[in-house]
Amino acid sequence: MSFTPTRRVFASSLIALAASGALAQSGYPNKPIRIVVPFGPGSGTDVVARIIAEELQGELGQTVIVENKPGANGTIAADLVAKAPADGYTLVMGGSSTHSSAPSLFKNLPYDPVTDFTMVGNTVETQFALVVRAESPAQSLKELTALLQAKAGKGTFGFGSATTQIAGAALMKRLNLNVTPVPYKSNPLAITDLIGGQFDFMFLDLTTAMPQIRGGRVRALAVAAPARVSELPQVPVFAEIGVPNFTLYSWLGIMGPKGLPEPVADRLANAMTKIMNKQTVKDRLAPTGKPIPPVARSTYPAYLREQRDGWAGKIKDAGIQPE
């Protein structure tokens, strides 16, 4: 069948439109980009996001804005980005709270953590410490356990993320203690009430915890890691104080909505690879956790499924029921 002149014109127009779309994508970015952070300012996720935003700005030659959208264990921010236009201008600093544990914590999660996102680069794995306020009589996990036992079910712990909720619940189950969890929109908000004596303990990522520890406002009793960490060499890991195999890491990564055009996704992924290979960036990220080496973008769906399934097991072991 031969084209009529009208069909030829129509076909040429489609080709021209496709070409212009490709050119627009290859010109990405031509306006500011925003990275939505699921937790409040000062959180570990926020600190990492701001380092990455500054570096991306240099790599992409475009303004990169960090926007905090805390709430619902980070799922408000993740859902916002999942439903954003797939053009590369709205990204999220996702991670263990929003993409690994959320499917097991919420019965009706409004997004699929694997299929509704295009992941373009990992950043760090973070570690967590068990902390109490400086004025707490508990100088060790043993003393904290005795304190909570004496409260006979009236003890409390705060949390501002899914990972810290899971850590607290898992430890209480291991110690056979009945303690009430108190939720916050982000960990920095919870710290204020911890210092004020509103609850007994909490878990904190080291990025958020260290300024409070150095300032003498909170005390670390243990670190959920396989070996002592350089930031807190005097603080034992749980295995040293009678709680074996109690470790906790969370990951953070940059992602956009599903369906990002390949040129855009590749541009972001290449920029993230350059950033994460810089020694200066590794040094800047080191206090926030262990930088994760760049990997091929094609491996991320499998990585997200693996993390989701692994955290599902942690949540089950902690005895947390989905909301």
Image (spheres, rainbow, N blue to C red):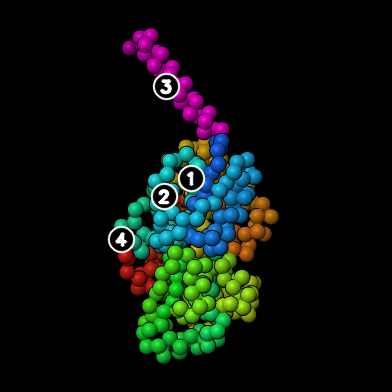
Of label 3 and label 2, which has the lower sequence position?
A: 3
**Residue contact between numbered discs 4 and 1, judged by CB atoms under 8 Å:** no
- Dot 4 crowding, Cα within 10 Å, few <14, some 14–19, many 20+: few
- The residue beneath circle 1 is 90
Q: Which residue extends farthest top? A: 5
Measuring from the top left, give residue 138's x and y in whole percent. Answer: 52, 86
| Secondary structure state at the residue bearing disc 3 | helix
User: In this orientation, which residue lies closer to the viewer: 34 or 114?
Assistant: 34
**Residue contact between numbered discs 2 and 1, judged by CB atoms under 8 Å:** yes
Residue 273 is left or right of residue 197, and the answer is: right
Q: Which residue extends farthest front? A: 196
- The residue beneath circle 4 is 107
| Secondary structure state at the residue bearing disc 2 | helix
Three-letter code for the amino acid on which mark 2 is drawn: Leu
Q: Residue at x 47, y 21 (%)?
A: 16
The Cα atoms of the two marked residues, 2 and 4, are separated by 18 Å
Q: Taking the image as drawn, is residue 185 in sight?
A: yes
The Cα atoms of the two marked residues, 4 and 1, are separated by 26 Å
User: In this orientation, which residue lies closer to the viewer: 30 or 312?
Assistant: 30
Measuring from the top left, give residue 253's x and y in whole percent. Answer: 51, 54
Of label 2 and label 1, which has the lower sequence position?
A: 2
Q: Nearer the viewer, mark 3 or mark 2?
A: 2
Measuring from the top left, give residue 271's x and y in whole percent. Answer: 59, 44
Of label 2 and label 4, which has the lower sequence position?
A: 2
Of label 3 and label 1, which has the lower sequence position?
A: 3
The residues colored magenta run 1-27
The Cα atoms of the two marked residues, 3 and 2, are separated by 32 Å
Q: Residue at x 32, y 69 (%)?
A: 321
- The residue beneath circle 3 is 14
- The residue beneath circle 2 is 80
